[in-house]
Image (cartoon, rainbow, N blue to C red):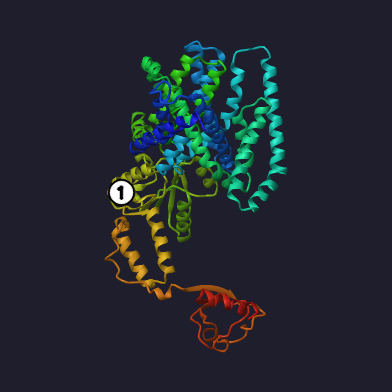
Amino acid sequence: MDIPVLPDITVVFGLAVVVILVCHRMKIPALVGMLLTGMLCGPHGLGLVRSAHDVEILSEIGVIMLLFTIGLELSLADLSRLKRPVFIGGTAQMGLTWVVFFALAFFGVDFSGGSSVLIGMLAALSSTAIVLKTLQERAEMEAPHGRVSLGILIFQDLLAVPMMLAVPLLTGRTIGFTSSIVYTVGKGALILFLLVVMSRKLMPGLLLSIVRTRSRELFLLAALGICLAVSLLTAAIGLSLSLGAFLAGLLLSGSDYRESLHEAVLPFKDVFTSLFFISIGMLLNVSSASAHLGEVLAAAALLLAIKAVAAGVATRILGYPTRVAVLVGLALCQVGEFSFILAKAGFTQGVISEHFYQKFLAASILTMVLAPFLIALAPRAAVLVCRLLRVCETPEDAPTAEYSNHLIILGFGAGGRQLARAAKAAGIAYVILEMNPDTVRNEAKKGEPIIFGDASKPGVLTHICVQEAKALAVVVSDAAAARRAVEIARFENPAIYIVARTRFNTEIKALLDLGANDVIAEEFEASLAVFTRVMDKFMLPRDDIERMVQDIRREGYKAMLPGSLDEMVGFVPDKSLAGLHVTVFTVDTASPLAGRSLMDVHLRREHDLTVAAVRRGDEFVPNPDGPFVLAANDRLYVMGTAEALKKGAGLFRGAA
């Protein structure tokens, strides 16, 4: 059997494995490796692929899957939690970027109106895949700049499909322009209405029937079928396949099976989306880009600079300090993957020329390659920008009282809230420093002594009397800001006690070197909690477990390395205890045990069960003796083998 596309797919995937492996070792995102793979094997590179058109057709499935998963990931709950970054920040970022690039194209380069509108849209989008993956790897998703970046990216995803819908209207054909808009919007409204009806009336019952079969294959086929069927439905009335996929995902995002649907299509999305990015790389004419290298580099620099400033201004509009604005700006300054889809649609429909299309592809790919490195350099760039601008962002809501011998809490997430609650209960004076303006506004109304400011600025910590403070608790998610705050606090107050929370063990040494007295690593503490529970399950002596935990804490994170526990505690668990279990039984009113003493019921002799403790209301009785009389509704902690516990369960319910 001759399958023309099979050799090409084999070459593409084989080369992609090699290129992405090299990129991984160089800490370059896999997405960039896919683009480079396409450039190498495409007709403008080494020419290894003969049927580029067939690969391109398969890549269209990747676009459908990508938009389906974007729709699934966008729930109303997400939009509500990030509503200000999404709608205010997103509008500001995309609006500013679009206006600047539209003006440059229309007035500066003399492009047509339709082309200028499209160029503004192409520049306004950022790479969701690169930004979120990089921020997740750096554990910065919960940091202020991570939350703002996520909100703006969500807004971009929301507008990506309407932008796609608008491309046919930018061809410059004024005849019937208004009627075509009305007709297009009408078709979109009709299909949306039909899908809403289906999602509420048909889909819940259908999905429930499929889930009840417990067939993974059937669920997978259903997920793919829904995605492709809705895509074909939208295509049948003249709209795009990608729009249908997005709508299908969005309408299913409220389903109880949202996560399962996402998991089912994820492998297909990854494979076919990889083909999409590889096919984009194939479209790039390397020789043409090389011939216009100066223009490509200038375009890439212009994109990075203007987009960084626009995203930074949007962040400042949200009320965040300059440092966060710089971090967000450098995170979102690259061109997005959806811009390739828009550019290809614009080129196909004649909105932009092939010459511009090739230069745009080259400049965009260059911004994507640089994106991870710019995100990594962003903290240093933020410090430099603040110094150049001579920014000293003093808290606007200055404390009215002079603080002394107080506690400073940096960050008001879950950890900061618990610490503030405990300090208030103990009568300890405290002040909170937070960079989220919404949190500051809401908590100040509740009477919390909370102030807006960036702890990485010396003037801010001085303003809240760090020189007179007794303790500083650093519970922020931004690792760079935490390090800088510890350094400043130790310099300003050599006697202050500093405890810092961090995500990973690798941050412990840096924080200790900068002056922290204690560092609590979430990764380290979580591993200790798991270790303690596992050892307890194997019935190891409690004092030995506690001694081992103390040894691990004393040795620090180095003790978590293989072989480091060998000489700490020398004991062997008693394997004869491994079969014992402890279960809680409630004595029913009809149980024959109610009103009788333990010595009368002979649980140990006749049923191989031992009562370890009894809870009666608020009273807890450990190791009850023989004369102890059981009562209805007592909760008994009973120890025995699994078989003995199963056989004796009826005694407590009233049926021996």
The image position of residue 197, as x and y in percent, is 72, 39
- Say above or below: 404 vs 564: above
Residue depicted at x 68% and y 46%: 206
- Say above or below: 460 vs 652: above
Residue depicted at x 68% and y 14%: 176
The quarter of the image holding the C terminus is: bottom right
- Say above or below: 423 vs 321: below
The residue nearer to you, when weighing 227 against 180, is: 227
Residue 537 figure quarter? bottom left
Q: Which residue is mark 1?
A: 493
Whether residue 278 is visible, yes or no, is yes
Question: What's under tag 1, amino acid-wise?
Answer: Asn
The image position of residue 227, as x and y in percent, is 61, 37
The image position of residue 638, as x and y in percent, is 52, 77
Question: Which residue ends up furthest to the top in the rendered image?
Answer: 110
Whether residue 250 is visible, yes or no, is no
The residue nearer to you, when weighing 66 against 444, is: 66
- Residue 361 as seen in the image, left or right of residue 388: right
The residue nearer to you, when weighing 166 against 391, is: 166
| Secondary structure category for the residue under label 1 | loop
Residue depicted at x 33% and y 38%: 25
- Say above or below: 389 vs 225: above
The image position of residue 472, as x and y in percent, is 37, 51
Question: Which residue ends up furthest to the front in the rendered image?
Answer: 1
